[in-house]
Amino acid sequence: MLSEDELSWIRNVLQDYVPGEISPSYFYKEITEFERNQNRGKVRKELDALRNKMRRYTPEELLLFKNKKERESEGLHDFSGIYIIHNSDNDTYYVGQAGRVFNRAYNHFLANAGNDQVYEDFFLGDTFSISLIPLNITSFSTLNELEDNAIRAYDSFHDGYNKMSGNVMDKYIFKNGEYQEAANIILDKIKG
């Protein structure tokens, strides 16, 4: 429960709040989505260039390389990045992100462990190749930014396996610092 002092302070902070006022987070999200959609072709070229330089894996290799010793015997190490799953038979994509891509990407080729549509097509015999792209060799600064741009570049949400679009917002943007502080106080009380 919030104390009377906390409630009074929050009321004071929010006294300039105008009902119906559009949040700065909304503007940021709309501008970011517009810019990312405009840059889809450029991002696709960047990612395709990286994919063409790097090894592509089969689902069977991913299952094998889930084992750390198997990876290390091939000189492979797990890393933070994205994985791009391409169904060669119907030219459909799935894009995901992980702190350890080898430990995540293979799940899509196991029953009840990843994307059910990817698994179903794999089970029915479709041909897949998987590209694993480390965050640190791209022009992006966060996994969310890289994944969202890749989902847009490969149109894997509207015309692919992704069931959700990528993450545009890593954090909310507040009108001022006191708004954020008030939100944090309320959230801390809810969590507690």
Image (cartoon, rainbow, N blue to C red):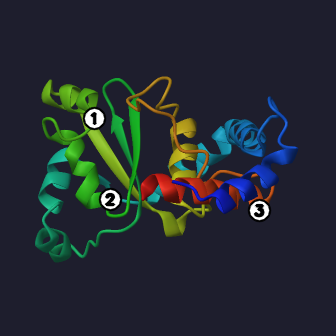
Q: Amino acid at mark 2?
A: Val
What kind of element bears circle 3? helix
Q: Amino acid at mark 1?
A: Asn
Q: CA distance from mark 2 to mark 1?
A: 15 Å
Residue at image position (68%, 62%) is 5
What kind of element bears circle 2? helix
Q: How many marks?
A: 3
Q: In front of the other: label 2 or label 3?
A: 3
Residue at image position (14%, 48%) is 60
* Residue, disc 3: 177
Residue at image position (68%, 42%) is 36
- Compare marks 2 and 3 and give the one earlier in the sequence: 2
Query: Depth check: 174 or 83 in front?
Result: 174
Question: Residue 187 placed where, x, y %?
Answer: 53, 54
Q: CA distance from mark 2 to mark 3?
A: 36 Å
Confirm or deny contact between disc 1 and disc 3 (CB under 8 A).
no
Quarter holding the C terminus?
Answer: bottom left
Q: Is residue 75 left or right of residue 112?
A: right
Query: Depth check: 91 or 164 in front?
Result: 164
Q: Amino acid at mark 3?
A: Gly
Residue 169 in sight: yes
Q: In front of the other: label 1 or label 3?
A: 3
Query: Depth check: 107 or 41 in front?
Result: 107
Q: Residues within 10 Å of mark 2 (few under 14, many from 20)?
A: many
Q: Residues within 10 Å of mark 1 (few under 14, many from 20)?
A: some
Confirm or deny contact between disc 2 and disc 3 (CB under 8 A).
no
Q: CA distance from mark 1 to mark 3?
A: 40 Å
Q: Is residue 156 left or right of residue 62?
A: right
* Residue, disc 1: 115
Residue at image position (12%, 74%) is 69
* Residue, disc 2: 101
Q: Is residue 131 left or right of residue 1?
A: left
